[in-house]
Image (cartoon, rainbow, N blue to C red):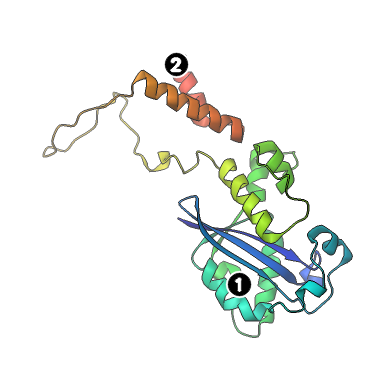
Amino acid sequence: MRQIVLDTETTGLAWERGHRVIEIGCIELIKRRPTGREFQRYLNPDRQIDAGAMEVTGISNESLLDKPRFHEIVDEFLDFIRGAELIIHNAAFDIGFLDNELSLVGRELGRISDYAEVIDSLRMARERYPGQRNSLDALCKRLGVNNAHRIQHGALLDAQLLVEVYLTLTSGQGDLGFAAEPTPPACGVVPSSPTARPRRVLRASAEERALHAERLQKIEKKSGVCVWLAQSEATLD
């Protein structure tokens, strides 16, 4: 599975009021592992940055004067995200801005959802931690992700933090491969067809079971819940 963790910085809070994207940061994951491929661009928005946005991002109007416009990098950006699963924190915000940028290019480019599936990590966090603060900073603190270097917001920096948050938040929900395994028979015997050779049933040693239990405890410590640990304890009881 190819995933792109994405974040943007903007001149203000509402594209409906004419605000524009000033930075895009993307990090590629393949099978939940960073590949080293990144896409990061600062953009000239052809308008002033709100004072509040400038304070949060540290990006000045002057620093963007020599940067490309969105229409100059749009094809490269769309090629980078095409066919991927986009992981975005508070996706409605970023997608609203990016869809608006696409509409301003002057070509029929459609919407971001025409190029990639969008997953909102904020929605996932709210389902996991209802009634709690689920900002990126709050999740970093809760999940043990070091964000001490995040003095100001930046699209690529925030995407890097979101990679760690997302992988920790979803730890055990795909990287362990359990979903692909068929449900074993209750007796533990591997079924075979009439023409299949008999198969040996390999059972874990005491040392392997201890390492497995240690791994499950680490998952529970990071994510706050581990279904397989609870099932293991119930089996032992």
Q: Residue at x 61, y 77 (%)?
A: 73
Q: Is residue 163 above or below residue 181?
A: below
Asked which quadrant contains residue 68, the reply is: bottom right
Q: Residue 135, can we see it?
A: no
Mark 2 touches mark 1? (CB < 8 Å): no
Please say if 234 is above or below 66: above
Residue located 78% across and 55% down the image: 152
Circle 2: element type? helix
Circle 1: residue type: Arg
Please state which of residues 159 and 37 is positioned toward the viewer in this rendering: 37
Residues 22 and 86: in front is: 22
Quadrant of the image for the N terminus? bottom left
Say which of 209 and 99 sits in front: 209
Residue 86 in the image: state x and y as whole percent: 57, 59
Q: Classify 10 Å Cα crowding around label 1: few (below 14), some (14-19), many (20 and above).
A: some
Describe residue 79's horizontal placement relative to residue 197 as left or right: right
Q: Residues within 10 Å of mark 2 (few under 14, many from 20)?
A: few
Return the disc, 2 or 1, that comes first in the chain's sequence.
1
Please, what secondary structure does the residue beneath circle 1 have?
A: loop
The residue labelled by disc 2 is 236
Q: Position of residue 198 (x, y in %)?
A: 15, 32
- The kind of residue on which mark 2 rests is Leu
Q: Which mark is residue 111?
A: 1
Q: Is residue 189 above or below residue 7?
A: above
Q: Position of residue 21 (x, y in %)?
A: 73, 70
Q: Which residue is at 65% across, 85% downward?
A: 106
